[in-house]
């Protein structure tokens, strides 16, 4: 990082965002020392302008902010910190310092209230619960019990059907089969102990390269 700490007298604003919900949790300030401690401990640490000292968010309440990623803006004078909160972030007991609810997509919502893109994350977690609970009568459970070979075969079958519909030009069928492919891929990933997040990490590494 090449941050300009001098613009604000040795400090830079740090916006903390929930890595899962993308909700802004709070805003604080960091100096060079606070940033280094945050990077070393993976716990968000600020510089208190009133107390003139470092303070790690959660050191009193236990509601720490666990760092997932740290980004700097194009002017090199502001930080975006993606984190996982242990609990309410605001000292008044709110999920965020802006008095907003920070429920994960789908946690307290109906299917229709979940955004289309967010539903993929909801589905992945739903499949994960199926893998742990293995309820009888569930198609997903039957896939898990069929073994890796069968699950891999289903991914292959759905991939072929997706390709066929793409070539035939039937857009409605193409989306239908592509959805089947994604579902069965998530099932296979879950059975192997992986998730779409692992694919994201791999693709991000390639993109950086």
Image: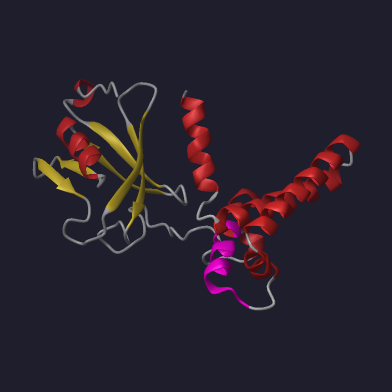
Residue 60, above or below 164: below
**Left or right of residue 204: residue 1:** left
Indicate whether 69 appears above or below 62: above
Image quarter in which the N terminus is found: top left
The residue depicted at 25 percent of the width and 59 percent of the height is: 91
In this view, the residue farthest toward the left is 52
Start and end of the magenta stretch? 123-135
Name the residue rendered at 31%, 59% in the picture. 86
On the image, the x and y values in percent for residue 46 come to: 20, 42
Left or right of 96? Residue 206 is: right
Tell me which corner region of the image, top left, top right, bottom left or bottom right, holds residue 51: top left
Percent coordinates x, y for residue 23 in the rendering: 44, 49
In the displayed image of the protein, which residue is found farthest to the front? 149
Q: Nearer the viewer, residue 34 or 189?
A: 189
Viewer-nearest residue: 24 or 206: 206
**Percent coordinates x, y for residue 58 in the rendering:** 22, 56
30 relative to 182, above or below: above
Q: Is residue 124 magenta?
A: yes
Residue 17 appears at what percent x and percent y? 39, 45
Q: Is residue 205 above or below residue 195?
A: above
Left or right position of 57 against 146: left
Per the picture, the main secondary structure of the magenta-coloured stretch is helix
């Amino acid at each position: 990082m090449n941050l300009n700490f001098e613009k604000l007298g040795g400090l830079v604003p740090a916006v903390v965002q929930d890595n899962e919900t993308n909700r802004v949790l709070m805003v604080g300030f960091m100096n060079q020392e606070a940033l280094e401690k945050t990077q070393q401990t993976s716990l968000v640490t600020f510089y208190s302008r009133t107390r003139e000292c470092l303070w790690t968010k959660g050191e009193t309440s236990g509601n720490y902010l666990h760092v997932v990623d740290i980004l700097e803006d194009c002017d090199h004078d502001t930080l975006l910190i993606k984190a996982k909160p242990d609990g309410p972030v605001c000292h008044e007991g709110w999920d965020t310092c802006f008095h907003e609810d920070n429920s994960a997509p789908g946690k307290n919502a109906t299917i229709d209230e979940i955004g289309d893109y967010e539903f993929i994350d909801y589905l992945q977690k739903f499949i994960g619960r199926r893998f742990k609970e293995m309820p009888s009568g569930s198609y997903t459970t039957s896939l898990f019990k069929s073994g890796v070979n069968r699950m891999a075969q289903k991914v292959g079958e759905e991939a072929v059907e997706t390709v066929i519909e793409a070539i035939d030009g039937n857009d409605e069928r193409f989306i239908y089969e592509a959805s089947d492919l994604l579902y069965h891929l998530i099932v296979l990933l879950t059975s192997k102990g992986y998730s779409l997040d692992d694919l994201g990490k791999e693709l991000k590494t390639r993109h950086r390269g």
